[in-house]
Image (spheres, rainbow, N blue to C red):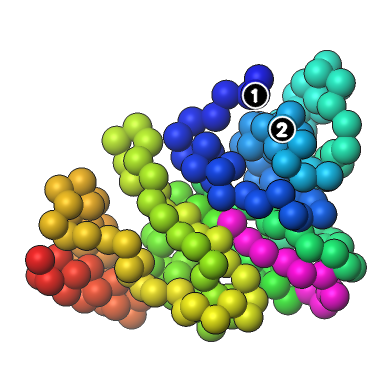
Amino acid sequence: MKTRLGKRLTALFNVIADDYDSVWDLCCDHGRLGMALLETERTPQVHFVDCIDSIMTDLAARLEHYGARNYQLHCCPAEHVALPASGKHLLVLAGVGDEVTVRIVQQLHAQTTDAHIDWLISPANNLFQVRQFLQPILGVLDEGVIAENGRLYEWLWVRSGAPKTIANPALFWNPDDAEHRRHLGKLLKHARQQQRQAHNPQADAAALAYAQLLESR
C-alpha cells in the first residue's frame, strides 16, 4: 500500500469489511484513508467529502496523478451529502470534535433511504457526549481504543438496529491498566472542569461515570 497511515487510521482501515458497495470518507483529512481503500480495492467505490476547497483540489490532483479510479469527490459539508438510495454503505467519520460529529450523524441519520448504512466513528474528544447521543439511535457492532502520539482514541462501528447497546463509558476500559487509568483520569479532570464553568448535566453525568469506573479498580 503506497499511502502511509498512522496507527489510528490503520486501526480504522482494518475494521472496514470488504462487503460494502461504497465507503464514504467524511471530513476526509486529505483523503489518506480513502486512498488506502482505493489502492487495496477494499470497496468498489470511495466517496471523499470535505468542505475545504483547497483540500479537495489537492486530493483531486493526487488521485489523478496516481491514476485512481472508482471514486467521487464532494466539496461540501458532510451533513449535506445525499445518501445512496439502496445498497450497503459505510460512512467513516474520524478526527473531528464531538459537536461536529453529533451534527453530521444527526442530519444524515434523519435522511430517508432504503440503503443499509453503517458508521465507523472516531471523534477527537468528548466521547461520553457522543456515545450519549448515539445510544438511542444506533447499536454497536464493534469498538476499541488505539494509542497514537501519546493519546488514546476510541472508535465505534455502529448500525441502526444492531442488537448490542452502546455502553457509556465503553466496556473495554480497564482501570487496572496504567495507560487506561491515566486516560480516564484526564477525562474525569476535563469533565470536572466543564462542571465548574457552567451548569452542564452532560458533564455531571460524565464526571460521575468516570469517577465510578476509576473507583472500581
Which three-letter amino acid code belongs to the residue tagged 2? Thr
**Residue 199 can be seen in this image:** no
Check the picture and name the quadrant holding the C terminus: bottom left
Image point (49%, 30%), residue name: 6
Which quadrant holds residue 73? top right
Which three-letter amino acid code belongs to the residue tagged 1? Met
**Residue 39 can be seen in this image:** yes
Q: Nearer the viewer, residue 53 or 156?
A: 156
Count neighbours of disc 1 (C-alpha within 10 A) and say few if under 14, some if 14 to 19, many if 20 or more: few
Q: Nearer the viewer, residue 202 or 60?
A: 60
x, y percentage for residue 105? 63, 66
Q: Is residue 81 magenta?
A: no
From the viewer's perspective, tell me whether residue 44 is left or right of residue 96: right
x, y percentage for residue 168? 36, 73
Image point (52%, 37%), residue name: 10
Contact flag, marks 1 and 2 (Cβ < 8 Å): yes
24 relative to 171, above or below: above
Q: Secondary structure at mark 2?
A: helix
Residue marked by disc 1: 1
From the viewer's perspective, tell me whether residue 186 is left or right of residue 26: left
> Residue 40 bears which disc, if any?
2
Which quadrant holds residue 63? top right
State how many labels appear: 2
Image point (56%, 50%), residue name: 15
Magenta span of residues: 111-120
**Inter-mark Cα distance, 1 to 2:** 7 Å
Q: Nearer the viewer, residue 52 or 158?
A: 158
30 relative to 124, above or below: above
x, y percentage for residue 25? 69, 46
89 relative to 23, above or below: below
